[in-house]
Image: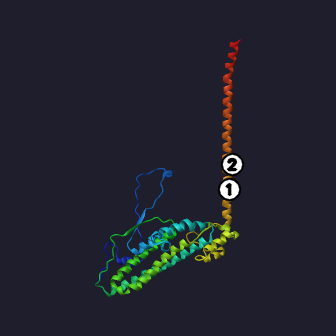
Amino acid sequence: MTNIESQKGTSIAKMLSSSSDLFGLEKSKSNTSTRSKDQIGVLRANVEVNLLTIEAARIFDGKSSAKNGPSGFIPGLHPFDARVNNVIVPAHKLGCPVARTALIKIENMTNTLDENIKHSHESISAKIKEYIAQNPQVNINQPTNDTPLTRTISFSTPHTRELFGLLIKFEKVIILQKTYFYLMPKERQEIMEEQRSVTKLFRSIMHLSMQYKTNQSTAIDYSEGNSKASDMFVMNEKYFSEAKDMLQSSATSIFFPKFKTSEEIIAERDKRYDESINESNEKEKESLAERSQLIAKSEAENSEDKVDNEPQNVSEELSVQ
């Protein structure tokens, strides 16, 4: 009878399943509370993950340019998240077709990555199951790591959260692959090639986000076809040559389907201008009203001073007579 169990409660058998549980969240207790909804605090997520393999850790962290030089820089999940959240998504929302192209390509590549990980999981699972069937006397325990790499999860975009979820799935595959290496070392090279192809796709997705360049162009520039729009296409020709086709396409991001048209941007700009003029007029009215009040108060004080001085002048005239 074959015994397949883990040294720490997570079994190889469970990893062979299609379970996608990543982590559990516990309810936290606050030191203070309030009965007023106006005083309720902001919900802050504090989620950590323990990465068990160096391969997953390298994908998560990437490589710093400080250590490897500009050519050796490989973005990790946090730089990827910052780039998508702070540069690409805002440009897309303002109607930039190049940014829309970048998001669509990232999403399509992520879908391909998902399929590749599923294929790798099915492939290595079949190999382990076959080995177990042929060697029922062997007990296989999941490899453990007494010093995992702890990382905090604080991603802003759904693209990064999706990549992170795939990284967790991929690490399960890596652990299965490493387990199989112990059993069948002759097949290591073949499995490593498959593992490297998945790793390369992770890095290609994050690298692609860094290739997007912007000159702050909006839907207005593309509707006018001005030099700013033309420059944007030239700047991004190498990685996003399909962007020009986006001007006539309704294709858009899965996570950010809406983007502003030139008409909407102009309407919002005019509205902000009108609000600014109205606010300026209101402040001017308030200033004039305050000035009028000060003048009236000053005139009233001068009038009181005259009244106070008149009796004194009469008494002085009588004393002289």
Say whether residue 20 is visible.
no
**Quadrant where the image shows the N terminus:** bottom left
Residue 60: which disc?
none
**Quadrant where the image shows the C terminus:** top right
Name which quarter of the figure residue 9 lies in: bottom left
- Between discs 1 and 2, the one toward the N terminus: 1
Residue 251 placement, left or right of 80: right
User: Residue 302's x, y, as percent?
Assistant: 68, 29
- Identify which amino acid the numbered label 2 is placed on: Asn
Query: Which sits in the foreground, 180 or 212?
Result: 212
Q: Which residue is mark 2?
A: 281
> Does residue 200 sit above or below 67 in this rendering?
below
Q: Residue at x 68, y 42 (%)?
A: 288
User: Residue 97's x, y, as percent?
Assistant: 62, 72
> Does residue 254 sit above or below 183 in this rendering?
above
> Does residue 247 sit above or below 306 in this rendering?
below
Dot 2 crowding, Cα within 10 Å, few <14, some 14–19, many 20+: few
Coloration mode: rainbow
Q: Which residue is mark 1?
A: 273
Q: Residue at x 43, y 76 (%)?
A: 170
- Identify which amino acid the numbered label 1 is placed on: Tyr
Measure the alpha-carbon separation of dots 1 and 2. 12 Å
